[in-house]
Image (cartoon, rainbow, N blue to C red):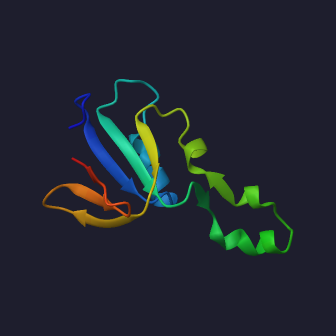
Amino acid sequence: MSAAGRKRVIVVGAGFGGLAAAKALGSKDEGSPVEVTVIDRLNYHLFQPLLYQVALAGLAATDVAYPIRAALHGRRNISVLLAEVTGVDVAGRSVRLDDGKSLPYD
C-alpha cells in the first residue's frame, strides 16, 4: 500500500488498452482507493495506422500523436512515468525498470 493507504496499480504501456484502464481507474477527487502509475517509454500515444497520412502531408503530426499526460489530465490519482519496463517480479510484486529501479504494486 502507498503512504496514503491506497492500493498501488501499475499500467504498463499507454496504448489504447493502457489508457482505457488508467481512465477507468482514474478519479477527479482525492478520495480514490487506488494510486495508478502509467509507465511508457514515450510521452505520447501514437495512432500508427495514420502515419502514412502524416508522411503524405495529409495530416499534421499532432493529429496522430497525443501527449499521455494530456489524455489523463484531471485525474488526481494517476501519475505518468517515462521509463521502459524490463521485467516483472510477480512473487515480489514489483516492476523492474531500465534504470535499475523497481516499483512495488498491489
Q: Residue at x 21, y 47 (%)?
A: 106
Label count reads 0
Q: Give the x, y percent position of residue 96.
A: 29, 61
Horizontal side of 50 relative to 89 (left or right) equals right
Q: Residue furthest left?
A: 91
Q: Residue at x 33, y 38 (%)?
A: 35
Q: Give the x, y percent position of residue 86.
A: 34, 68
Q: Give the x, y percent position of residue 3.
A: 24, 31
Q: Give the x, y percent position of residue 53.
A: 79, 71
Query: In the rendered view, would you say 74 is above or below 51?
Result: above
Q: Which residue lies furthest to the right in this view?
A: 57
Q: Residue furthest front?
A: 100
In this rendered view, identify the residue nearer to me: 49 or 70: 70
In this rendered view, identify the residue nearer to me: 4 or 29: 4
Q: Quadrant of residue 89?
A: bottom left
Split into 4 quadrants, where in the image is the N terminus? top left
Query: In the rendered view, would you say 77 is above or below 17?
Result: above
Q: Residue at x 55, y 59 (%)?
A: 42
Q: Which residue is drawn at 38% across and 41% down?
A: 25
Horizontal side of 65 relative to 11 (left or right) equals right
Horizontal side of 79 relative to 8 (left or right) equals right
